[in-house]
Image (cartoon, rainbow, N blue to C red):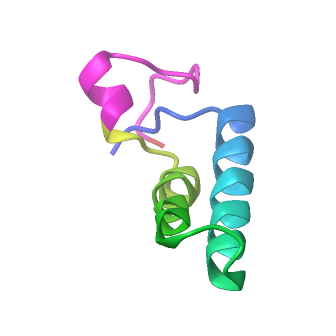
Amino acid sequence: MNRNIGTIDRLLRILVGVVLIALAATGTVGWWGWIGVVPLLTGLFQRCPAYSLLGVNSCGLKSDK
């Protein structure tokens, strides 16, 4: 699978995901905070299905690494 998420994009996704999950777990926000799982997983796997559909690549790499 090709990576399509760059370093800064990846770090931001992981940060936002963790913050949203933490806020949901502590009850600060509602159940919708669990949506933070999506940016967390896309950041960890360095692959975004929406980016693939739109032809976006913030990674800058064309390899399969």
Residue 12: image location, x then y, percent: 72, 42
- Left or right, 16 with reference to 36: right
Q: What range is drawn magenta here?
A: 50-64
Q: Is residue 10 above or below residue 57?
A: below
- Left or right, 25 with reference to 39: right
Q: Nearer the viewer, residue 34 or 3?
A: 34
Residue 34: image location, x then y, percent: 50, 69
* The quarter of the displayed image where residue 18 is located: bottom right
Q: Which residue lies furthest to the left in this view?
A: 53
Residue visible at 49% across and 61% down in the picture: 41
Q: Nearer the viewer, residue 10 or 25?
A: 25
Residue visible at 48% across and 51% down in the picture: 42
Q: Is residue 36 above or below residue 2?
A: below
Dominant secondary structure of the residues highlighted in magenta in the image: loop
Residue 16: image location, x then y, percent: 69, 52
Residue visible at 45% across and 30% down in the picture: 63
* The quarter of the displayed image where residue 6 is located: top right
Q: Which residue lies furthest to the bottom in this view?
A: 26
- Left or right, 55 with reference to 44: left
